[in-house]
Amino acid sequence: MTQQELVALIKKKKSYLCVGLDTDVCKIPSHLKTSKDPVFEFNKQIIDATIEYAVAYKPNIAFYEALGSRGWESLYKTMDYLPKNVFTIADAKRGDIGNTSEMYAKTFFEHMNFDAITVAPYMGADSVLPFLKFPNKWVILLALTSNQGSCDFQQLILQNGRPLYQEVILKSQAWASENQMMYVVGATHIEHLKETRKIAPHHFLLVPGVGAQGGSLEEVSNVALNAANIGILVNVSRQILYTSPSQDFFIQAKKQAKALQETMASFLDS
């Protein structure tokens, strides 16, 4: 999916909601656990409930890998079920020496046909560039994550006076344009999100941390929206997935997604 197609989809749905499919088999409603494929059945009902309001879906690969071959089967089925006109992100956080990164890229871009993959930049340019060889596919580079430990390394001040996460953003802009590179910046770091928008004015930002982790959708929207191309996807996982443990979980998920979309629409219309 190109940037133009993504922007058009956001404008059509008046939404920049990304639903994180961090499907934990231990947390899904008990009535689904007797089905042949509980993870896929849960994902299917979440997708049906939220597709009207979401423009992107982000399976967290770890939750599928942990189940072995059954998990991979559930992931493939989920990808096949998702409509072709939504933006799909493999939250895989890969990144290794060049030939290994190339294999990761083939896995998620060729075999599974994701639109984007999250990539860890710690090993430098040659670990990221193989992912950028695929046309109309995106690298979403980890810049400043929403977890508490992000201060251990990502916010360290370098000799040039910049924090490490900003150096990552600035340096990586030479590797690809805003048509192929996005950045992860957590909603729990609102001031840093504001600084990120200054140094990456035209790139899309994938913003986790809204909802269960305490980030504010309103603050994120005020700081990160870009008048030229909108420029943000806000990922929400637990607030949508696990609102209810009962058989009506999909109804509650739909209510959460609708409320988020309505807030987003108000910012897009303003």
Image (tube, rainbow, N blue to C red):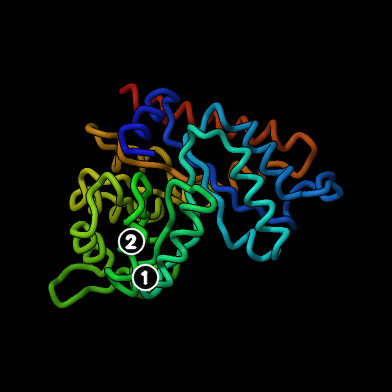
The image shows residue 30 at horizontal and vertical percentages of 82, 48
Q: CA distance from mark 2 to mark 1?
A: 12 Å
Q: Which numbered circle lies on residue 151?
A: 1
The image shows residue 71 at horizontal and vertical percentages of 69, 58
* Residue 118 vertical placement versus 12 (above, below): below
Quadrant in which the N terminus appears: top left
* Residue 263 vertical placement versus 105 (above, below): above
The image shows residue 129 at horizontal and vertical percentages of 30, 63
Q: Tag 1, which secondary structure? A: helix
Q: Quadrant of residue 60?
A: bottom right
Residue placed at 34% from the left, 26% from the top?
Answer: 268
Q: Tag 2, which secondary structure? A: strand
* Residue 202 vertical placement versus 110 (above, below): above
Judged left or right of residue 144, residue 32 is: right
Q: Residues within 10 Å of mark 1 (few under 14, many from 20)?
A: few
Instruction: Work out whether residue 214 or residue 154 is closer to the camera in this orientation and state it.
Output: 154
Q: Residues within 10 Å of mark 2 (few under 14, many from 20)?
A: many
- What amino acid type is highlighted by mark number 1? Cys
The image shows residue 55 at horizontal and vertical percentages of 47, 34
First in sequence: mark 2 or mark 1? 2
Q: Residue furthest bottom?
A: 159
Instruction: Work out whether residue 205 or residue 152 is closer to the camera in this orientation and state it.
Output: 205
- What amino acid type is highlighted by mark number 2? Ala
Q: Which numbered circle lies on residue 114?
A: none
Q: Which numbered circle lies on residue 143?
A: 2
Judged left or right of residue 259, residue 71 is: right
Q: Quadrant of residue 10?
A: top left
Q: Residue furthest left?
A: 160
Instruction: Work out whether residue 94 or residue 13 is closer to the camera in this orientation and state it.
Output: 94
Quadrant in which the C terminus appears: top left
Residue placed at 42% from the left, 57% from the top?
Answer: 118
Residue placed at 72% from the left, 41% from the top?
Answer: 244
